[in-house]
């Protein structure tokens, strides 16, 4: 049935058969939005209206830490490189003006090349690399 509806297969976490990390991450973000009604939605139209506004906020206004605090829309449009370069310049100028404030290097503002929810890590038992789950941005 999902194939008929053109639903793509899950990008679940490795070795966790009943979990979809992309959706779980999105649900957590939605759950903590202050405009989410505490007592649920009054009707289906209210839920759809809230979801529409949430998706717009999530894709266009929310700055995601995994992509260096740019929005998915900025990333998908290829604007992240320019935004991050400008931020790097701001940090460099601030460090030059007030060096005693900085104990080390400034924040890393280089664009992320690959974004995954589960980056490659060493297998604890055998020391072998475990491949990451690759998929589209959770946007």
Image: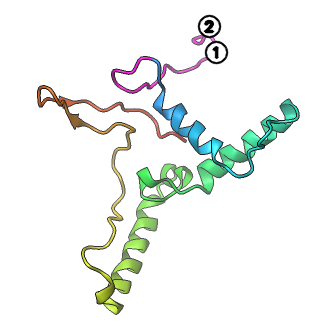
Q: Residue furthest bottom?
A: 97
The residue nearer to you, when weighing 128 against 39, is 39
**Which quadrant: the N terminus?**
top right
Q: Residue furthest top?
A: 1
For residue 109, above or below residue 76: below
Q: Tell me if mark 1 has few (under 14), some (14-19) or many (20+) residues whose alpha carbon lies within 10 angstroms of its own.
A: few
**Which quadrant: the C terminus?**
top right
The residue that appears at 30% across and 32% down in the rendered structure is 132
Q: Is residue 47 covered in magenta?
A: no
The residue nearer to you, when weighing 37 against 97, is 37
The residue that appears at 53% across and 33% down in the rendered structure is 24
For residue 102, above or below residue 54: below
Marker disc for residue 36:
none
Majority SS type along the magenta span: loop
The residue that appears at 39% across and 38% down in the rendered structure is 117
Q: Residue 13 is drawn in which quadrant?
A: top left
Q: Position of residue 127 (x, y in %)?
A: 12, 31
For mark 2, give the secondary structure.
Answer: loop
For mark 1, give the secondary structure.
Answer: loop
Marker disc for residue 1:
2
Q: Position of residue 14 (x, y in %)?
A: 34, 24
Q: Position of residue 71 (x, y in %)?
A: 54, 55
Where are the magenta residues, as a range? 1-17
The residue nearer to you, when weighing 72 against 119, is 119
Q: Residue furthest left?
A: 126
Q: Is residue 60 left or right of residue 116?
A: right
Q: Position of residue 133 (x, y in %)?
A: 35, 30
Q: Residue 60 is drawn in which quadrant?
A: bottom right
Q: Is residue 110 left or right of residue 82?
A: left
Q: Which residue is mark 1?
A: 5
The residue that appears at 80% across and 41% down in the rendered structure is 49
Q: Is residue 110 left or right of residue 40?
A: left
């Amino acid at each position: 049935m999902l194939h008929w509806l053109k639903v793509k297969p899950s990008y679940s976490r490795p070795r966790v058969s009943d979990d979809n990390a992309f959706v779980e991450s999105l649900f957590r973000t939605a759950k903590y939005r202050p405009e989410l009604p505490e007592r649920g939605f009054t009707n289906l139209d209210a839920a759809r209206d809230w979801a529409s506004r949430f998706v717009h906020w999530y894709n266009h206004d929310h700055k995601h830490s995994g992509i260096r605090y740019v929005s998915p829309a900025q990333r998908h449009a290829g604007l992240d490189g320019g935004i991050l370069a400008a931020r790097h310049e701001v940090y460099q100028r601030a460090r030059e003006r007030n060096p005693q404030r900085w104990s080390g290097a400034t924040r890393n503002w280089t664009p992320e090349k690959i974004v995954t929810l589960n980056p490659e890590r060493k297998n604890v038992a055998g020391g072998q690399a475990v491949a990451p789950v690759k998929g589209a941005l959770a946007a």
